Amino acid sequence: ALVEFAGVVGATTDDKLGYLRRTKGGSNWKQAGAYSARAITKVDDEVRGVSADCATNNKRVMFGLTNNAADKDHDFNSIDFAIYCDQQHTRAIVYERGQKKAVIGSFASGETFQVALNDEGAVEYYKDGELAYTSANAPAFPMYVDVALHTNGVVLENVRWVKSVVSSPE
């Protein structure tokens, strides 16, 4: 199911679910973003995480899961478990509470990334269905989808709830 966004600031959903585009001019992490209306409430919730496509070129966006939906500054430092789509350098980087944890590779426009809970409750990061990184930090519930839009015009699309984590067979 596509994510319904709330608390949209400096951006638009264009009346579409699972879609965000920054409309505020300039480039700044703290001025544009949104969070999900729904939250993940426990490890074995109906939904386990979020996936999204990094779509536009030469832009920057972070998305992931956070315990604090009340944090409306839309700064990436407040996202507990984030994937940074650095489209300017075509690389994806794991960030947790503003700290760089791992570069999970280069990517082409439209590749899908996921941040999701595994059966044991650990947060995992996926690139096109392949496990790329597992967090050492434990999640706190509830967890909302949180998005920080850095660059004017940046688009994050196909933002979906992940119901189960499916990785490629070994």
Image (cartoon, rainbow, N blue to C red):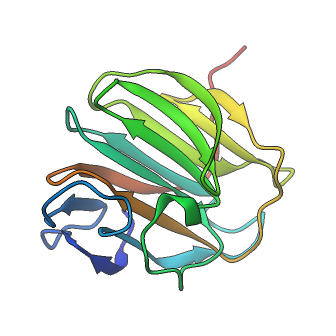
- The one nearer the camera, 169 or 42, is 42
Query: Image quadrant of residue 69?
Result: bottom right
Which residue is depicted at the point 57% across and 66% down? 78
Placement of 109 over or under 17, stated as above or below: above
Which residue is depicted at the point 22% across and 72% down? 10
- The one nearer the camera, 77 or 44, is 77
Placement of 109 over or under 113, stated as above or below: above
Residue 97: tell me if it is visible: yes
Q: Position of 146 compared to 57: left or right? A: right
Which residue is depicted at the point 31% across and 58% down? 28
Position of the N terminus, as image quadrant, is: bottom left
Query: Image quadrant of residue 60?
Result: top left
Which residue is depicted at the point 31% across and 50% down? 158
Residue 1: tell me if it is visible: no
Query: Image quadrant of residue 19?
Result: bottom left
Q: Position of 135 compared to 11: left or right? A: right
- The one nearer the camera, 28 or 70, is 28
Q: Position of 41 compared to 63: left or right? A: right
Please provide percent x and percent y for residue 131. Answer: 65, 28
Position of the C terminus, as image quadrant, is: top right
Q: Position of 141 compared to 159: left or right? A: right
Please provide percent x and percent y for residue 108. Answer: 31, 22
